[in-house]
Image (cartoon, rainbow, N blue to C red):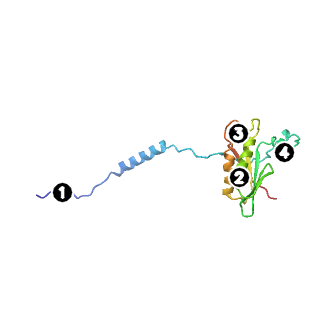
Amino acid sequence: MRHRNRFSHGNVELNMAAMLDMAFQLLAFFILTFTPSPIEGQFALKLPPPVAQTQPETLTPASNDAEAMLDLQAIHLTLLANPEGRLSAVLLEDQPLFEGDWTPQHATLLNNQLKEIFQTPDSPFHQIQIISDKTLHYGDMMKVVEVVSRQKLANGKPLREIGFSERNTR
């Protein structure tokens, strides 16, 4: 016995208005309920102010560099580049910290120096200003920023105020 096809071979029409309505409802639902995940490794960038970092009225005659550093609002970390753009030296408050290519030992040395400064209970510092050569490669700067961003203040809070400025080479 032969089966007959019960369905007609005519054209099928879809109701586009209903499909568009459903698409817009889904779109609105996903937009209203979307919550992005927090950005990892986020820290506040503090751009250099238009005025000097020191307050002349609070400066006192200092007998050594350690006392002079306590009168500053921010720690100044200077990054010097060689002609190829690689990191060649790091200065902490104009005092050479190390010279040569970046190594894990340099990262440890910088970390220990910054930890000693920021974790002192009576330390007035809560920010760091990174001053770099214009030609310094981004990757080399980010190695230093990684060490700086791991620092904690004396109260246990992470260091979040990191400023950047370009070194004047006159």
137 displayed left or right of 20: right
Whether pointer 1 and pointer 3 mark residues with C-beta atoms closer than 8 Å, the reply is no
- Element marked by disc 4: helix
Q: Alpha-carbon neighbours of circle 4 within 10 Å: few (<14), some, or many (≥20)?
A: few
> Is the C terminus in the top left, top right, bottom left or bottom right quadrant?
bottom right
Please state the horizontal and vertical placement of residue 11, each as a whole percent of the image: 26, 58
Whether pointer 2 and pointer 1 mark residues with C-beta atoms closer than 8 Å, the reply is no
Residue at screen point 21% across, 56% down: 8
Residue holding disc 2: 105
Q: Which mark is residue 65?
A: 4
- Disc 2 to disc 1, how far (Cα)? 82 Å
- Disc 3 to disc 4, how far (Cα)? 21 Å
Q: Amino acid at mark 4?
A: Asp
Whether pointer 3 and pointer 2 mark residues with C-beta atoms closer than 8 Å, the reply is no
- Element marked by disc 1: loop
56 displayed left or right of 145: right
Nearest to the eye among marks 2 and 1: give it: 2
Residue at screen point 40% across, 48% down: 23
Nearest to the eye among marks 2 and 4: give it: 2
Q: Quadrant of residue 116?
A: top right
* Residue 47 visible within the image: no
138 displayed left or right of 74: left
Q: Alpha-carbon neighbours of circle 2 within 10 Å: few (<14), some, or many (≥20)?
A: few
- Element marked by disc 3: loop
Residue holding disc 3: 153
Please state the horizontal and vertical placement of residue 73, each as a whole percent of the image: 77, 42
Q: Alpha-carbon neighbours of circle 1 within 10 Å: few (<14), some, or many (≥20)?
A: few
Q: Amino acid at mark 1?
A: Asn
